[in-house]
Amino acid sequence: MIDTHSHIYLEEFDSDRKEIISRAKQVGVKKILMPNIDSGSIERMLKTEQENSEYCFAMMGLHPTSVNEEFEKELDIVSDWFKKRKFIALGEIGIDLYWDKTFKEQQIKVFEEQVRMAKKYSVPVVVHSRDAFPEVFSVIDRLWDENLKGVFHSFTGTEDELFHILEYETFYLGLNGVLTFKNTNLREVIKNTSPEKILLETDAPYLTPVPFRGKRNEPSYVKYVCNVLADVFGISADRANDITSENAKALFFNQK
């Protein structure tokens, strides 16, 4: 399995990060991909990557909830880092209108600029969309071509939103603990696609799957998402693991 979205560099894991990584390896997690948040998280993320090279891989980007009047300065930092070194993706980026719409127009501008940056550096985008599918689709509809690829992280959309994403042939759906929740209709929605369009993720420390809901999430719990995904499509957990891992390799590591 590959946990394609995990914030294990955050302070929530400072007391037992080594143990968490060990548990992930024990259950068969082969890689952990780490999305950035903003300039304040870069040092922690890169330190975690350095201490766990060949296992933890950093992205670079500006999260929509960190967009404010200083967004140009933050974007310059992202751009400067891409000039310094390679990253597996530009993320996580997107639009989030759930908490606050104050900087809506700035979020749209920042998202568009980062999508263009991803095309410039030939890296996939990891898209965060919360209460903002129309705005996100508007940007990608204008910029999408075969050179733009990525994943809609933590997908919890409707059938119509699913079908819109599937029109972007180079994009995947990222599924996490929400898939295991009793009160979700996500399992029914994703039946409209196939495992070949899906990536596994945890979004640790958030969105912990059943049976640990309410506790801190961690990469080893991705197996519970994999098990439910297998049930949805009537395949074995091993097969679900194989398919989603190949998808992740194809998107982020450009290999089968």
Image: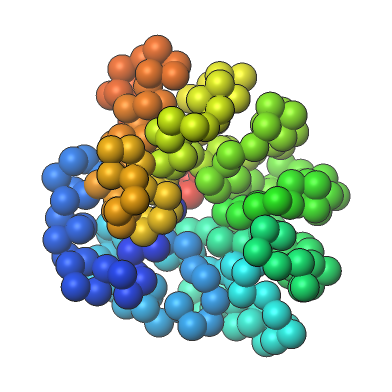
Number of labels in the image equals: 0
Viewer-nearest residue: 93 or 161: 161
Residue 25 shown left or right of residue 30 in the figure? left
Viewer-nearest residue: 146 or 198: 198
- For the point 41% across and 56% down, which residue is it? 206
Quadrant position of the C terminus in the picture: top left
Residue 119 position by quadrant: bottom right
Residue 119 shown left or right of residue 57 in the figure? right
Viewer-nearest residue: 214 or 43: 214
* Residue 92 at x, y percent in the picture: 56, 61
For the question of whether residue 256 can be seen, the reply is no
Question: Which residue occupies the extreme top position in the image?
Answer: 234
* Residue 140 at x, y percent in the picture: 77, 49
For the question of whether residue 184 can be seen, the reply is yes
Residue 188 position by quadrant: top right
* Residue 255 at x, y percent in the picture: 44, 41
Residue 18 position by quadrant: bottom left
* Residue 101 at x, y percent in the picture: 76, 67
Residue 243 shown left or right of residue 53 in the figure? right
Q: Is residue 134 above or below residue 17?
A: above
- For the point 52% across and 70% down, which residue is it? 37
